[in-house]
Each structure stands twice: as C-alpha cells, then as structure tokens.
Image: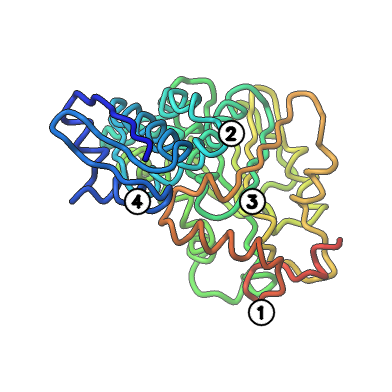
Amino acid sequence: MPEITMNVDRLENVISVFGSFDENLRLIETELDVRITDRNSELVISGDAERTSEAERSIRGLLTLASKGENIDSRSVRYILGLVKNGQDDKVGELLSDVVCITAKGKPIKAKTLGQKTYVEAIKKNTVTLGVGPAGTGKTYLAVAAAVEAFRDKTVNRIILTRPAVEAGERLGFLPGDMQSKVDPYLRPLYDALFEMFGAETYNKYLERGNIEVAPLAYMRGRTLDDSFIILDEAQNTSKEQMKMFLTRLGFGSKIVITGDITQIDLPPDKTSGLKDAMRVLEGIQDVAICRLTASDVVRHVLVQRIIEAYEKRGGAPSPGSGIPSPSRKKR
C-alpha cells in the first residue's frame, strides 16, 4: 500500500490542524479513505496513491491556514479538501491574506473562502457590487466590514444600510411604536454587524451625528446620496421599480453594495425580483461587479451547507411561505 511521510514542525500549528482528539485528521481519513499515523514529528499517510497525495496536500493547506492564525475546524477541513479535489490548493495561501476590517474588540475580519476574497476585492475596485449567494456566505457581514473600513479611512462620510420590509407590506403602519420601532425587526441583522464593528457606544455616537443611517428602502426615494457607502440587503425582495429607484440614488464619491439570495424570494409569484432583473440588466457594465457566491462559500455550521446543497440538488418545490421559490417562479 502506497505511503507518504510528512515531516511536520511548528508544534502549535500541528496541534491546531489535528484538532481535539485528532478529529480533523479523522475527518480527512473518512473523506479520502486513507489512514494517517502520527509518529513524533512525522505523519505517515497510507492508502490509494491518488488519495494519499490529496491528503498530504490537504494537511499542508491546513498548516498554511494555521500559520496565519486561523482556527482549524471541520468547516476549514472540508473547504480545503474541496480545493484540493478541484486542483485549487495552490490558492490556499491567498486566503486570510487581507484584513477587511478590525472589530471593536480587535478581531480581524478576513475573507475565509476564495469566493469571499473575490467579493471583497470587487467591493474595493467597483462603484457598484452585487453579492448574490445562499445564506451563510458572509454577503452582508463582509459588506458592512468594508463600509466601516471605508468610513474609518475617511473615504466616505456616511454609512447607509437599507433593506425592504417585504413581510410588513402595507401593514407597517399598524405595528406598535414609532417608525424606528416598526422597522427595527427588519434591520436587526444590519444593527448586529455594525455593533460588532464599531461597538455599541461608538455606533450610537455616529448614529446621533447622522454618520450612520439604517432605514427601510422606501425612505431612499427622492434622495441623492453623495460620499456614502450604501448597502442594500435582502435585495431579492425588491421589485424592479424599487431596484431602479435605489440604483439611481448613487451620488458622487459613493459606493453601493447590493446583497441577496435569489433562492429566498418573498415577493408574490406575479412580481419579478429586482435583484434578478438587475443581474441581467447590469451584466457587463463598467464599474459594476456581480459576484456569485456558492454553497462552498458558506462559513456557518457545516449543516447549513448540506441543506443548501440538498435544495439545489432537488431543484425546488418547497412549501409556500418557506422563502424558497417554487419551480414556476424560477421560470420568470
């Protein structure tokens, strides 16, 4: 049976790659059908010749991530295994290379997948960026991180976060409290990201000064937004008219990031998603980037990735109100 012997040093990196009770090595063994034996400062990998080579490349990729301070978990292992199987393990060194933003607690925010890295680079280079992909791919979180960094660098004077309150519809006025109380539930994910980046005290200070604005999409009508970093979240729930209205708010010195998941459209079946329409209309336009993130870019629990892949494999037909379009809606 073919064997590969790896010399490993930097004990702290090795411990991180092995995982608790060698769980990461066991995962590699299971996925590739190989056997990995630890002999002091050496790892012996035995099994099919091609699989042992993939295991060695996977472990070297994980050691590279560990050397950059990344915590190695099952998600990291599965992602590196995917890169190796696709012949992209030479790009592992590109991951975690750039810090998008530092949170209030000093945590560096970095792109964890190649798709996320492409997305972050697109935001930096283009005036308008569309980030489209399933839940858990970091679309909103990375966009907010980029906005905060641009604000700290004084590239922009304001951060404006908005999303459509589709679920409320015309019933928004019947909800209790003032307007801020009415829309808060729909904007909570944006608040959470800002709190982490700025800290609650700094966030409130900038909010009072008008440097940060969080508002429903309807409030964007009739405005021209200069020197601002504007994020439209949950854009799959905009109509074509709303999307056009939003895009034409762009002013001088501003940047727009639009995020959404076209598999979770909550609009009535007879309405076309503004995000899907914009992806067609804006394709190929200079200074506009369309980034398509996939299930492989999911950075939440591994089960989230499996759920997304299961739905993609089945091809739809979920129950009404699940937020995932039926096959008839996909034909639009």
Residue 181 in the image, given as x and y percentages of width and height: 48, 64
State the SS at label 1.
Answer: loop
Marks 4,1: beta carbons within 8 A: no
Could you tell me how far apart the alpha carbons at marks 4 and 1 are, in whole angstroms?
34 Å
Camera-side mark, 4 or 3: 4
Camera-side mark, 4 or 1: 4
Mark 4 = which residue? 27
Could you tell me how far apart the alpha carbons at marks 1 and 2 are, in whole angstroms?
32 Å
State the SS at label 2.
Answer: helix
Mark 2 = which residue? 119
Q: Residue furthest bottom?
A: 319
Number of the label disc, if any, that sits on residue 260? 3
State the SS at label 4.
Answer: helix
Q: Nearer the viewer, residue 308 or 61?
A: 61
Residue drawn at 62 percent across, 49 percent down = 133
Quadrant of the image containing the C terminus: bottom right
Looking at the image, tell me whether mark 2 or mark 4 is earlier in sequence order: 4
Give the image quarter of residue 92: top left
Marks 1,2: beta carbons within 8 A: no
Name the amino acid, label 3: Gly
Number of the label disc, if any, that sits on residue 319? 1
Name the amino acid, label 1: Ser
Residue 100 in the image, given as x and y percentages of width and height: 44, 28
Looking at the image, tell me whether mark 4 or mark 1 is earlier in sequence order: 4
Q: Nearer the viewer, residue 179 or 189?
A: 189
Q: How many marks?
A: 4
Camera-side mark, 1 or 3: 1
Could you tell me how far apart the alpha carbons at marks 1 and 3 are, in whole angstroms?
21 Å
Residue 44 in the image, given as x and y percentages of width and height: 26, 35
